[in-house]
Amino acid sequence: MDGNSAQQPLLLPPSVGPSYVKRKTSLFTSLAKFILKVVMWVAFISWVGIAFLLPGEFSTHIVTVLFNATGGTVFGFTGSFFLLFTAPILLISILAFAYIIISGEEELPKKKTSGHPSFRLWTFPVIVDGPFGVVSAAEFIGILLFGVYVIWAVYSYILKAFNSIPDQLSFKVQSSLFLESMGLHLGSIGIFCLAFLFLPVSRGSVLLRLIDIPFEHATRYHVWLGHLTMVLFTIHGLLYVFAWTIEGRLIEQILEWKNIGIANLPGVISLLAGLLMWVTSLPPVRKLNFELFFYTHQLYVVFVIFLALHVGDFVFFISAGGIYLFMLDRFLRFCQSRKIVEIISTKCLPCGTVELVISKPANLRYNALSFVFLQLRELSWLQWHPFSVSSSPLDGKHHMAVLIKVLGEWTAKLRGNILNASASEAVPEEELPLKPNTKLTASVEGPYGHECPYHLMYENLVLVAGGIGISPFLAILSDILHRVREGKPCLPRNVMIIWAVKNSTEIPLLSTVDMESICPSFSDKVKVETHIYVTRESEPPLEEGNVQSTVTTSAFPVSNGHAMSGLVGTGHKVWSGLYLVSSTIGFIILMVWLQIFYINPYGISTWWYKGLLIMACMALSILIFGGSVIGLWRLWETRILEKEGYGDGVIKFDKKQHNENTTLKESSVKSPTKSTLLKYGTRPDFEEIFAYISKCWGHVDAGVIVCGPPTLQASVAKEIRSHNIFKREKDHPIFHFNSHSFDL
């Protein structure tokens, strides 16, 4: 390695701009998107505003008027609650699909002509330590708003409870009534929080796509909301337990199952299911036994169904919108994962990493920061694991690659199967007592990720990885180089990679992207500089400049394979939209029929039973109406494959293209290039690194993407916050923090 390479400014100065960025938007498209945005914002603010004002006295009159709008009709208060709390979120979802379809392929923003970088709420880290992890300014505002709502609601309900209790009653009775009143109101706050709880875990949710928050990032919001919701529900239950104990009828009340009013026993069952999920999701338990966390979390079915039985139909509608969107996503995931996908190529890399190549249809869209969930049938029929995609969508139309680090039992079994199959290939078949299985099959959910490839929206990009966290950045590098070569929209022109690894055996992972092969003379348009830090070795194990490592050849021969299904919420926009619209219309039709032909004629008034009927309508609408669209979607997908010459969904794998784009070509991996700085026995000094970048890049916006453990994210975020607030000079960049780490 050239010792002077680290001191030479390898990055383009800010005055040099990429000539290959294009952008064009019609006036009609802009106007339509603006109108849709306004309508969605009005619906959202109205929905949140009603819930926020509900605890106050002022809202009582407004809500009464709104309830009376449908209270005298055939739908009664059930219709009022549906219109006020469920309809807005469904309307926003439908309009969101219209917005995404009209937008078409996301276009990259033009380079700012003002030359003044600016702070952004979503990418400015405010909190870097503590229970919430790294929190951006936008997330901090959201936390404050939820905190203000809860404090305001509790305060208002306390005043209401005190004012509603007659003074002439005994202290014992007053205490009991106060506890029951506060228990009821805390439960209503929890129901409202529950309306948001399921939205972040709808992996292909159109709402996440609308605001461009990928599922792996949104899971933290589910965790935060889950803690808040369960705290409220737990206190809700405890207050009732205290009140019933004071009254001397605890057991009687717990076992009570009313026909008119709140049914207590279903609420107890729902709360117990929620507590089991909550306790096993706490970090110490989850990290000690992930499978326990995973399987107990399937109790959400019990939690939701018995919640509907507990509160009845109209109260359940407060949170039904988010739950319904989750059910839509879950059914679509189920349909996608039913298809058996063949692993068409596998490879064991020298650092204990496995590469899997999966067949996919050409029309399945994803970006370089996507990830998939895999279930390998030969290893387990129950376990699903998320992995970042390590290949660019431009690497090949019909395949997708993932890199898997061997860290646990499941990944160790995977690597063992591949090595055993490789060994068996070297032994004559007649010498084997039993021919081992030389085929891997998988079920796949995804890909999921950002709606917009935000790594392409920064002219200056810093990629910080820890260990196998380099995997998505390999896809980013490949994507950028392919776009530069093909003249597609692509802003990055300065890319710096900061990679911390434990051992030098991991370094050859960078060779999985042959930059010169993808884009000859790429350095004329994009400058790539790499800093590698080997933390557990004080010096190179071999002669510097010739790091040797071997690669186990493919255990499963490259072959034709059944492609993964395109039935994914982030897939085809029109079909996804039709699935949502048809299911929603079906849900409304079933509720209307139920009200007109069953509930009203037969005088059905049992709360818990009507709650169960609503759950049945939700499930049947997805199964019948949504299932019909999925059937047509699958038929359309099959026809497309047949037109491309792939009958029965079998993709003919392009071995030549795969070898060129996604595999190591040689068993001896070459040393890092002269644009690479390699340090042993040290960790990245981010203060020094960001100071170096500031001098090279000048007054620009610089995107920083981090993929690694929480400690790495916190270190980078802390330095970005410190630099942007205290250390930045007027001619220095503004760094924008982005995380790409999946941590459940």
Image (cartoon, grey):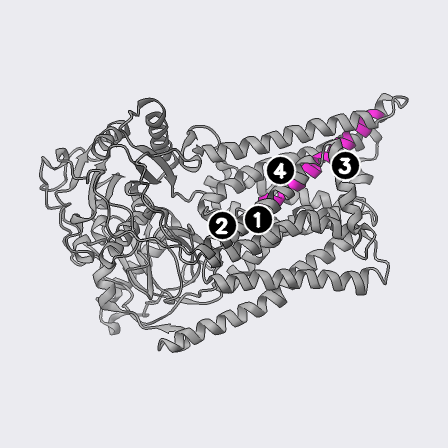
Q: Quadrant of the N terminus?
A: top left
- Asked if the magenta segment contains residue 181, the reply would be yes
Q: Spatial distance from mark 4 to mark 2, Cα to Cα?
A: 28 Å
| Residue type highlighted by circle 1 | Met
Circles 1, 2 touching at the beta carbon (< 8 Å): yes
Mark 4 vs 2, N-terminal side: 2
Mark 4 vs 3, N-terminal side: 3
Tag in front: 1 or 2: 1
| Residue type highlighted by circle 4 | Met
**Residue indicated by mark 3:** 60
Q: Is residue 700 above or below residue 196?
A: above
Q: Is residue 398 above or below residue 682?
A: below
The residue positioned 13% from the left and 50% from the top of the image is 670
> Does dot 3 land on a helix, a strand or a loop?
helix
Q: Spatial distance from mark 4 to mark 3, Cα to Cα?
A: 27 Å
Q: Which segment is the magenta one?
A: 174-198
| Residue type highlighted by circle 3 | Thr
